[in-house]
């Protein structure tokens, strides 16, 4: 019962940490550019819209939508890759598009399986108001996305429990396969991995399209999921788990038929559960880890052929170390009658295995950190870098605790070896003989061979005190350090899962660089609300400057009512001031163009931040002045 509670407590700790630490996933690709460019005003209607991203992307039927000013879709077909380039998305537009402002809304899936989205506008002829509505919520605000992120945590936890428990049995203590708590741990890991994988497969469609939870059972959407790279990886994972279940069941049956063994004896495992099972287990573990590495961060970016095997080793080392730690913590706490204790030699072997796994974790982690971060500065300036710094701090604590665990293991192993080979040889009993002068010595009764020697008083250091007390003390200290190390390992696992949902620093820098070198929009548009404090005297003014640069500019101003309709006003004035240099106010001299106000020869002499002073008069006595700033380049 106590062991069962320990298993539940460890699993609860995993879930609590991942739930408490779960955060939003960030975009893993960025929009490099578009044609037409964002904010551009075209003299003639374009035939198509093309987007270019920083890495390869995939999309569905609704990945790219172009909406007219009346919020009508004007791209009749779905998105396709442009000229065979997998980092592009292109849609053809309808013929004879009217003048006005069009909205491009996009949502694609980056190469590492994470959806990204955005929107921008361009105009034909001249800018106008638009009734197009584009969702501005975060990608992670949907119920499907939050549940999908949680299930990814569960999948990682199940992998760690399954791989770690199997590694402990095959490499450290084969007899542990017959121990009920270890079997229970294997079952928990396998079930968690199967359930989370099935749920991830169903939720993949709603996660990519921002759909509802009920759409998870849409067969057409599920069909598209299983043909994509993330979906294929999940299906393969389920097949591998089915094979693993068959092998685990057959091994358990053979152990159950193999009678006559003290569970403390390491020689009670059938011969056919030896090298062959180890080879099959290694192959299955590598294949399982590949279903993650082939569909996430390692599959995108630089050095992909090297990054994928490194990610596989990193995942397996994590599972062997963390799952093995949890298994060791459970067997160390066994208190079942006649259950015995885990042999000191098995603890020593796990210490060696854990040290090797930690070395692999550190080596592969350093490479992955360099690949994803790219610079020391990014550790503090990007979300990925800051999360990675937290993980590094947790790993440092793990190494400190692991040092003490290895020390107690070495002392326990050192104390067990002499005790195992030592035989107690009774010393001859000292008997005081009374001698009488001139008389023969008294006869002494012989001591029976093999009789125990029980001295009257045991002297310190005479070898009569058993070493069990020191061994028990070492085990007690080892249990404590292993428990602390396991908890810290769960923290590392939770942070690692967060990293898989966070945009790598190198990708973030690439997106920022692409944005920096992208051409400036050919128009500057600002919308300023106003409120005169009386009924029906609220609205907004949209000011458009073309091209929004030093020199001659065209200014158009449109007044909207509070409900978004067009409004006519008797007077609209606009002045511009460069407050830092004391330039202005420059009067734009707007003229009424029967529905909007405009001027076509406003001269702006210098770049910088200009303040717009907009005066709106709605009646003979009602007027208000509002202010906004705009950047002139």
Image (cartoon, helix red, strand yellow):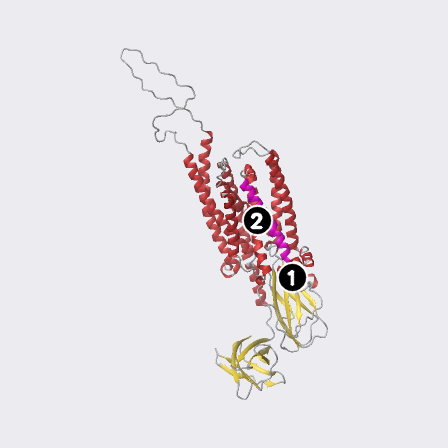
Q: Nearer the viewer, residue 420 or 20?
A: 20
Q: Which residue is mark 1?
A: 87
The x, y position of residue 584, in whole percent, is 50, 82
**Quadrant of the image for the C terminus?**
bottom right
Q: Residue at the left extreme?
A: 437
Q: Nearer the viewer, residue 36 or 271?
A: 271
Q: What residue span does the magenta drawing correspond to? A: 180-204
Residue 441 vs residue 581: left or right?
left
The x, y position of residue 136, in whole percent, is 58, 68
Whether residue 309 is visible here, answered yes or no, is no
Mark 2 and mark 1 residues within 8 Å of each other at the beta carbon: no
Residue 51 sits above or below residue 434 on the image: below
Identify the mark nearer the N-term, 2 or 1.
1
Whether residue 220 is visible here, answered yes or no, is yes
Q: Residue at the front extreme?
A: 1
Q: Main secondary structure of the magenta part?
A: helix
Label 1: how many Cα within 10 Å (few below 14, some 14–19, many 20+): many
Q: Quadrant of residue 24?
A: bottom right
The x, y position of residue 76, in whole percent, is 71, 68
Query: Which-is-in-front pick, marks 2 and 1?
Result: 2
Residue 53 vs residue 92: left or right?
left
Q: Residue at the right extreme?
A: 95
Residue 325 sits above or below residue 571 on the image: above
Q: Which mark is residue 29?
A: none
Q: CA distance from mark 2 to mark 1?
A: 34 Å
Label 2: how many Cα within 10 Å (few below 14, some 14–19, many 20+): many
Q: Mark 2 falls on what kind of element? A: helix
Q: Which mark is residue 158?
A: 2
Q: Mark 1 falls on what kind of element? A: loop
């Amino acid at each position: 019962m106590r062991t069962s509670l320990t298993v539940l407590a460890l699993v609860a700790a995993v879930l609590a940490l991942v739930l408490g630490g779960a955060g939003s996933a960030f975009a893993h690709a960025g929009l490099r550019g578009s044609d037409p460019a964002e904010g551009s005003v075209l003299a003639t209607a374009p035939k198509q819209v093309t987007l270019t991203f920083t890495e390869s992307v995939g999309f569905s039927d609704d990945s790219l939508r172009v909406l007219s000013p009346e919020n009508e879709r004007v791209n009749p077909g779905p998105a396709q890759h442009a000229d065979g380039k997998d980092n592009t998305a292109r849609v053809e537009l309808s013929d004879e598009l009217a003048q006005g402002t069009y909205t491009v809304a996009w949502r694609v899936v980056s190469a590492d399986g994470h959806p990204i989205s955005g929107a921008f506008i361009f105009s034909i002829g001249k800018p106008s108001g638009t009734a197009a509505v584009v969702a501005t919520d975060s990608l992670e605000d949907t119920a499907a996305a939050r549940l999908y992120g949680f299930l990814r945590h569960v999948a990682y936890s199940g992998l760690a429990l399954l791989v770690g428990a199997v590694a402990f049995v095959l490499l450290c203590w084969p007899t542990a396969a017959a121990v009920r708590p270890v079997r229970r741990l294997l079952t928990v890991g396998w079930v968690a991995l199967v359930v989370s994988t099935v749920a991830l497969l169903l939720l993949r469609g709603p996660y990519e399209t921002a759909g509802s939870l009920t759409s998870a059972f849409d067969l057409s959407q599920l069909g598209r999921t299983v043909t994509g790279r993330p979906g294929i990886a999940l299906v393969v994972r389920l097949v591998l788990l089915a094979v693993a279940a068959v092998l685990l069941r057959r091994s358990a049956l053979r152990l159950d038929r193999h009678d006559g063994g003290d569970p403390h004896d390491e020689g009670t495992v059938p011969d056919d559960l030896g090298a062959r099972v180890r080879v099959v287990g290694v192959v299955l573990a590598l294949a399982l880890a590949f279903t993650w590495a082939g569909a996430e961060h390692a599959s995108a970016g630089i050095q992909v052929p090297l990054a994928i095997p490194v990610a596989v080793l990193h995942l397996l080392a994590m599972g062997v170390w963390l799952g093995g730690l949890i298994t060791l913590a459970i067997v160390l706490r066994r208190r079942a009658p006649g259950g015995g204790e885990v042999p000191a030699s098995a603890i020593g072997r796990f210490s060696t295995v854990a040290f090797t796994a930690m070395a692999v974790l550190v080596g592969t982690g350093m490479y992955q950190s360099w690949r994803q971060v790219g610079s020391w500065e990014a550790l503090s300036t990007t979300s990925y870098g800051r999360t990675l710094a937290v993980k590094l701090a947790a790993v440092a604590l793990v190494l400190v605790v692991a040092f003490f665990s290895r020390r107690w293991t070495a002392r326990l192993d050192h104390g067990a070896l002499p005790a195992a080979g030592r035989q107690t040889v009774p010393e001859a009993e000292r008997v005081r003989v009374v001698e009488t002068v001139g008389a023969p010595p008294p006869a002494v009764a012989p001591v029976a061979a093999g009789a125990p020697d029980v001295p009257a008083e045991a002297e310190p250091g005479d070898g009569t005190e058993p070493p069990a007390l020191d061994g028990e003390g070492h085990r007690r200290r080892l249990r404590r350090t292993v428990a602390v190390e396991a908890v810290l390992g769960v923290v590392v696992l939770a942070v690692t899962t967060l990293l898989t949902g966070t945009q790598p620093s190198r990708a973030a820098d690439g997106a920022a660089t692409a944005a920096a070198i992208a051409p400036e929009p050919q128009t500057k548009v600002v919308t300023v609300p106003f409120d005169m404090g009386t009924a029906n005297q609220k609205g907004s003014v949209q000011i458009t400057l073309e091209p929004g640069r030093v020199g001659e500019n065209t200014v158009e101003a449109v007044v909207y009512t509070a409900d978004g309709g067009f409004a006519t006003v008797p007077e609209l004035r606009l002045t511009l001031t460069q407050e830092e240099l004391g330039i202005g106010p420059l009067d734009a001299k707007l003229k009424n163009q029967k529905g909007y106000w405009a001027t076509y020869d406003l001269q702006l002499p210098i770049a910088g931040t200009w303040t717009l002073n907009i005066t709106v008069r709605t009646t003979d006595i009602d007027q208000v002045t509002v202010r906004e700033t705009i950047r002139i380049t």
